[in-house]
Image (cartoon, grey):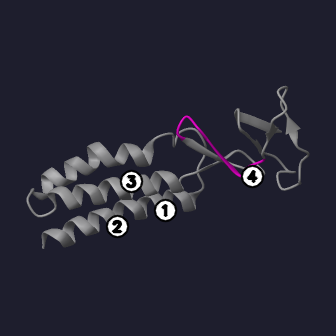
């Protein structure tokens, strides 16, 4: 199955996802490159045997936002305020679009570790 979600690239999903494909030429003569990952509505879809999403960008955004909160209000705000900021501002970055595809257990564990590391940093910063 070939997916063309953006006008500028193509992604292949299925048992032959690793096979080299012929160039696809548009009506105006441009070639569409084959890529391993496409962003569609904020979700990163990966070329794989079955439909699969990548959460690496979401985790990176979560860490970036949490570190920004720590940098701005780290020592001045109470732990309740910092925790509330992380829950309201950062957790949507981590959870956006997770219901789109079934995530393997290792990805869910990785998300748990991501949240736990930020909470450990919060508790360590306050002591």
**Mark 1 = which residue?**
110
Residue 68 belongs to the span the image colors magenta: no
**Mark 3 = which residue?**
62
- Residue 63 location, quadrant: bottom left
Q: Is residue 26 left or right of residue 126?
A: right
Numbered disc in front, either 1 or 4: 4
Residue at horizontal 42 percent and vertical 52 percent from the top: 61
**Vertically, is 42 above or below 68?**
above
Numbered disc in front, either 2 or 3: 3
* Sequence-earlier tag: 3 or 1: 3
* Sequence-earlier tag: 1 or 4: 4
Residue at horizontal 23 percent and vertical 55 percent from the top: 69
Q: Between 45 and 68, which is closer to the camera in this rendering?
A: 68
**Mark 2 = which residue?**
117
**Mark 4 = which residue?**
48
Q: Looking at the picture, how far across and down is residue 18, in whole percent?
A: 83, 56
Q: Quadrant of the N terminus?
A: top right
* Sequence-earlier tag: 2 or 3: 3
Label 1 secondary element: helix
Label 3 secondary element: helix
Q: Quadrant of the C terminus?
A: bottom left
Specify the farthest residue to the front.
29
Q: What range of the chain is rendered magenta? A: 34-42
Residue at horizontal 56 percent and vertical 41 percent from the top: 43
* Sequence-earlier tag: 4 or 2: 4
Label 2 secondary element: helix
Whether residues under marks 2 and 3 lie with C-beta atoms below 8 angstroms apart, the answer is no
Q: Is residue 99 left or right of residue 60?
A: right
Q: CA distance from mark 1 to mark 4?
A: 20 Å
Q: Is residue 60 left or right of residue 2?
A: left
């Amino acid at each position: 199955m070939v997916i063309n979600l953006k006008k500028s690239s193509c992604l292949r999903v299925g048992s032959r996802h690793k096979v080299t494909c012929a160039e696809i030429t548009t009506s105006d003569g441009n070639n569409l490159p084959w890529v391993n990952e496409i962003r569609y509505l904020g979700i990163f879809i990966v070329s794989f045997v079955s439909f699969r999403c990548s959460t690496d960008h979401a985790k990176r955004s979560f860490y970036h936002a949490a570190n920004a909160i720590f940098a701005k209000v780290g020592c001045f705000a109470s732990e309740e305020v910092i925790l509330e900021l992380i829950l309201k501002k950062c957790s949507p970055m981590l959870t956006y679009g997770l219901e789109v595809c079934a995530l393997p257990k290792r990805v869910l564990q990785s998300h748990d570790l991501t949240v736990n590391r930020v909470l450990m940093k919060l508790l360590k910063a306050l002591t």
